[in-house]
Amino acid sequence: MRAAGDVFEQRARAELERAGLTCLAHNYSTRYGELDLVMRDGDTIVFVEVRYRKSASHGDAATSVTTSKQAKLILAAQHWLAAHPQYARHACRFDVISYDGPVNAIRYKWLRGAFEAS
């Protein structure tokens, strides 16, 4: 499944770069989990979770970013910001890029500001 995840992360990165964002990091690992992509959108730092679901039998890809997953992503983002203090004062947001369906009929969705750190 890691190989499929890599393919969709690369695809998401390309989509975001076409939209004008700049990649600052990818697959950034912390003890809290991994940040798939860290992008810069103007002066905003964007932490991007990329999800793929071939089947919606357990919900779509975007809804798989549960409250507990969000909490881990927030902690990982805080870790990234602490390690990169030059970005610590920038506005931040959490986006989810989801891919749903079989590869030959994939649906792409970019949820800007999908959730917030409280």
Image (spheres, helix red, strand yellow):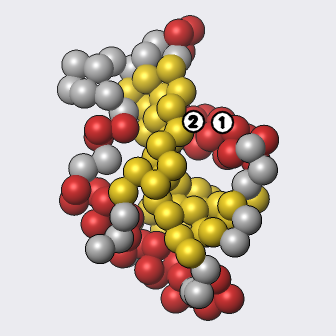
Between 7 and 45, the one nearer to me in the picture:
45
Q: Measured from the top left, where is residue 60 in percent x and y?
A: 32, 28
- Tag 2: amino acid: Phe
- Residue picked out by circle 2: 8
Whether residue 56 is situated above or below residue 29 in the rendered picture: above
- Tag 1: amino acid: Arg
SS at circle 2: helix
- Residue at position x 24%, y 50% from top? 66
28 sits left or right of 42 in the view: left
- Residue picked out by circle 1: 11
Q: Crowdedness of circle 1 by 10 Å Cα count: few (<14), some, many (20+)? A: some
SS at circle 1: helix
Q: Crowdedness of circle 2 by 10 Å Cα count: few (<14), some, many (20+)? A: some
Between 111 and 22, the one nearer to me in the picture:
111
- Residue at position x 46%, y 54% from top? 113
Asked if labels 2 and 1 touch by Cβ distance under 8 angstroms, the answer is yes
- Residue at position x 57%, y 86% from top? 88
Give the position of the N terminus as an image quadrant: top left
Give the position of the C terminus as an image quadrant: bottom left
- Residue at position x 78%, y 41% from top? 18
Q: Measured from the top left, where is residue 65 in percent x and y?
A: 31, 47
The answer to whether residue 110 of the structure is visible from this angle is: yes
Whether residue 118 is situated above or below residue 18 in the rendered picture: below
Mark 1 to mark 2 CA distance (whole Å): 5 Å
